Amino acid sequence: MCPACAPVYEGQLNFSGARNIANLYALVAQDIRTGSRMEPSLAEAAERHEILNRIETSAASKG
């Protein structure tokens, strides 16, 4: 079976980090199957990471 044809896990994951990764893998699989581009690019991910860092820094300085 090809990786793009793998079945999608339909259950519930208990750990939120695992759910996040599973959702990204599902988006990548959808993109492979359909030719779309739903998952974030590396540049978009880096931008979001920087925003989260700024939020954490701000919250820590006010705490």
Image (spheres, rainbow, N blue to C red):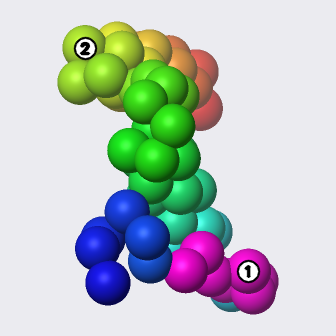
Tag 2: residue type? Ala
| Residue 12 image-quadrant placement | bottom right
Relative side of 16 to 42, left or right: right
* Residue 11 on the magenta span: yes
What's the magenta region?
7-13
Frontmost residue, 52 versus 3:
3
**Is residue 22 left or right of 54 when viewed as pictured?**
right
Q: Residue at x 52, y 66 (%)?
A: 22
Quadrant position of residue 45: top left
For mark 1, what is the residue? 10
Q: Nearer the viewer, residue 26 or 46?
A: 26
Can residue 57 be seen from the camera position used here? Answer: no
For disc 2, the marked residue is: 43
Screen quadrant of the N terminus: bottom left
Q: Sequence order check: which comes first, mark 1 or mark 2?
A: 1
The answer to whether residue 34 of the structure is visible from this angle is yes
Task: State the image coordinates of residue 25 (x, y, percent, origin top left).
Answer: 44, 58
**Circle 2 — which element?**
helix
What kind of element bears circle 1?
loop
23 to 52, vertically: above or below: below
Up-down: is 42 above or below 25?
above
Q: Disc 1 and disc 2: Cα gap in Å?
A: 29 Å
Q: Amino acid at mark 1?
A: Glu
Residue 39 locus on image (x, y percent): 45, 33
Disc nearest the viewer among 1 and 2: 1
Q: Would you call the spot at circle 1 few (<14 residues within 10 Å), some (14-19), or many (20 or more)?
A: few
Residue at coordinates 43% horizontally, 70% vertically from top-left?
A: 5
